[in-house]
Image: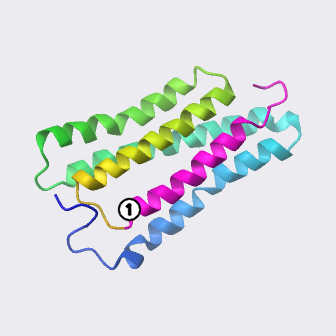
């Protein structure tokens, strides 16, 4: 398998443009949620936490599912790699769902950790399946901002909400 390439792909900057724009815009809820938890009155914390946790869970499920999509497009994947990608693609969503069982600060940290594991699996994906050259660098930047935001949010204190 060719690592980090896509057959017939446009130049990396043009290919990545919509993904860079939408990925960057998708960071707004992470950053806004973290800032809001540190700056808004305590009365808003339950709403901001629900919003931030829900958004992080949805995005975590989305990035996990990318592995399913890439694996389905593979021309000649090994049987083991196909299984690894398929199984992994559902794990982030399951962990996000399980995070609901924990208090908010812990759930935010679980999600941050899961985003880091997802990034490790994204690296594995680029080593075992054909992906655009811009995929992993973009995932690194998006993951770092999301993880930092979730960790900053997890230490906000939450008044009496956490």
Residue found at x 85% / y 46%: 39
Principal secondary structure, stretch drawn in magenta: helix
Q: Is residue 77 left or right of residue 45?
A: left
Q: Position of residue 140 (x, y in %)?
A: 47, 56
Q: Relative to 93, say whether 14 is above or below.
A: below
| Figure quadrant of residue 48 | top right
Decide which of 4, 31 is in the foreground and name it.
4
> Quarter-wise, where is residue 145 in the image?
bottom right
Q: Is residue 155 toward the left or the right of residue 114 in the image?
A: right
Q: Position of residue 112 (x, y in %)?
A: 56, 39
The answer to whether 31 is drawn above or below residue 134 in the figure is above
Magenta-tinted stretch: 134-162
* Percent coordinates x, y for residue 9 in the rendering: 27, 74
Residue found at the far top of this picture: 101
Which residue: 44% across, 40% down? 117
State the colouring used for the structure image: rainbow
Residue at 53 percent of width and 56 percent of height = 142
Q: Residue at x 36, y 44 (%)?
A: 121
Residue 158 on the magenta span = yes
For the view shown, which residue lies furthest in the right direction? Answer: 41
Instruction: Name the image quarter holding the C terminus.
Output: top right
- Judging by the rendered image, the residue that carries numbered circle 1 is 135
Which class describes the residues within 10 Å of circle 1: few (<14), some (14-19), or many (20+)? some
Location of the N terminus by quadrant is bottom left
């Amino acid at each position: 398998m060719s690592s980090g390439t896509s057959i017939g792909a446009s130049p990396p900057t043009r290919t990545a443009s919509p993904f860079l724009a939408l990925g960057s815009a998708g960071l707004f809820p992470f950053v806004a949620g973290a800032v809001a938890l540190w700056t808004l009155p305590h009365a808003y914390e339950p709403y901001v936490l629900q919003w931030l946790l829900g958004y992080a869970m949805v995005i975590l499920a989305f990035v996990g599912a990318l592995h399913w999509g890439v694996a389905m497009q593979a021309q000649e994947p090994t049987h083991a790699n196909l299984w690894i990608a398929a199984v992994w693609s559902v794990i982030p969503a399951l962990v996000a769902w399980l995070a609901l069982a924990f208090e908010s600060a812990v759930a935010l940290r679980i999600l941050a950790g899961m985003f880091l594991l997802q990034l490790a699996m994204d690296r594995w994906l680029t080593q075992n399946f054909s992906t655009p050259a811009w995929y992993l660098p973009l995932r690194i930047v998006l993951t770092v901002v999301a993880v930092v935001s979730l960790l900053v949010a997890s230490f906000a204190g939450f008044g009496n909400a956490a």
